[in-house]
């Protein structure tokens, strides 16, 4: 990305209870002067929605791609068919050919053309020059479709083992301008399973801690031997 790029963040089911780290990243990017606009596939369910203080602010500035009424569905589809007929045809082709895990793939992918058309219109209207998908699942597929409709490139983040994301990972890696991984073992897995992916298109980007806020008090500083002990709490799944 270049200085001055307008960035669109595409996040699934936002804001969720585990999404505070995403909000923190967005805030820090804005501190550095990056214009960021938020998009989400849909609102988080009542069970999974965030209870954190940031949630109402984040939801208030987010453009949700689904659901939409029938008139908007017709408008966003027809406007893209007229403005980018070849791009629209390539989106439909992608829906029938992308090798995701769900079968038949087109049943899952063809409905994504509608929110992709909506996102493409918003990308053009806001003059967004780069999209970022925060997980390499359906939100990355939306970015792939928008790339066909508008030519705007995208990047993606991988924050769990590769089999988690529904398949077509080679295609997602190849189409993304770059991919960031939050741990080295995820990079190791990708390099074992997808040896043909160009090394310059991926790298390590750990989930950070804001040391301006999270600073140990003096009595909790490392012991005399230099050991700093940390406690983490997470779900019992392999990627954690």
Image: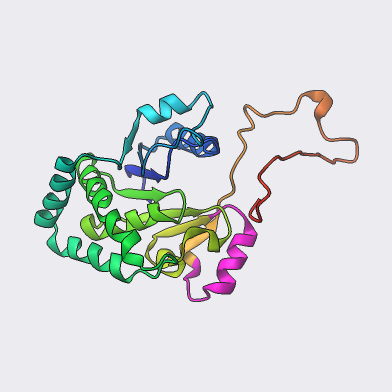
Q: Where is residue 1 in the image (x, y as percent from the top left)?
A: 38, 51
User: Which residue is situated farthest in the left direction here?
Assistant: 82
Q: Does the magenta segment cover residue 145?
A: no
Q: Position of residue 239 (x, y in %)?
A: 63, 54
The residue drawn where x is 42% and y is 30% is 58
Query: Does residue 109 show up?
Result: yes
Q: In which quarter of the image is residue 187?
A: bottom right
Q: In which quarter of the image is residue 168?
A: bottom left
Against 87, is 11 above or below?
A: above
Quick check: 186 left or right of 198? right
Task: Count all numbered tags in the image, as a single digit.
Answer: 0
Quick check: 14 left or right of 52? left
User: Which residue is situated farthest in the right direction here?
Assistant: 224
- Residue 219 vs residue 12, the one in the foreground: 12
The residue drawn where x is 39% and y is 68% is 103
Q: Where is residue 41 in the image (x, y as percent from the top left)?
A: 36, 44
Q: Which colour scheme is used?
A: rainbow
Quick check: 98 left or right of 192? left
- Residue 39 vs residue 225, the one in the foreground: 39
Query: Does residue 146 show up?
Result: no
Residue range of the region highlighted in magenta in the rendering: 181-199
User: Which residue is situated farthest in the bottom direction here?
Assistant: 196
Q: Position of residue 88 (x, y in %)?
A: 18, 60
The residue drawn where x is 43% and y is 41% is 13
The residue drawn where x is 81% and y is 28% is 220
């Amino acid at each position: 990305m270049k200085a001055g790029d307008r960035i669109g963040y595409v996040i699934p089911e936002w804001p969720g209870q585990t999404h505070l780290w995403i909000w923190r990243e967005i805030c820090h990017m804005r501190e550095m002067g990056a214009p960021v606009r938020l998009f989400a596939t849909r609102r988080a369910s009542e069970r999974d929605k965030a209870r954190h203080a940031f949630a109402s602010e984040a939801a208030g500035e987010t453009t949700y791609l689904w659901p939409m009424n029938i008139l908007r569905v017709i408008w966003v589809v027809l406007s893209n068919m007229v403005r980018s007929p070849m791009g629209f045809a390539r989106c439909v082709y992608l829906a029938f050919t992308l090798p995701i895990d769900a079968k038949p793939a087109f049943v899952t992918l063809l409905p994504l053309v509608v929110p992709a058309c909506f996102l493409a219109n918003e990308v053009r209207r806001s003059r967004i020059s780069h999209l970022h998908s925060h997980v390499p699942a359906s939100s990355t597929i939306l970015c792939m479709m928008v790339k066909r409709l508008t030519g705007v490139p995208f990047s993606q983040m991988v924050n769990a083992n590769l089999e988690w994301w529904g398949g077509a990972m080679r295609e997602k890696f190849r189409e993304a301008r770059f991919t960031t991984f939050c741990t080295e073992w995820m990079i190791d897995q990708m390099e074992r399973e997808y040896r043909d992916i160009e090394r310059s298109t991926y790298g390590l980007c750990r989930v950070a801690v804001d040391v301006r806020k999270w600073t140990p008090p003096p009595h909790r500083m490392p012991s005399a031997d230099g050991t700093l002990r940390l406690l983490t709490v997470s779900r019992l799944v392999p990627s954690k």
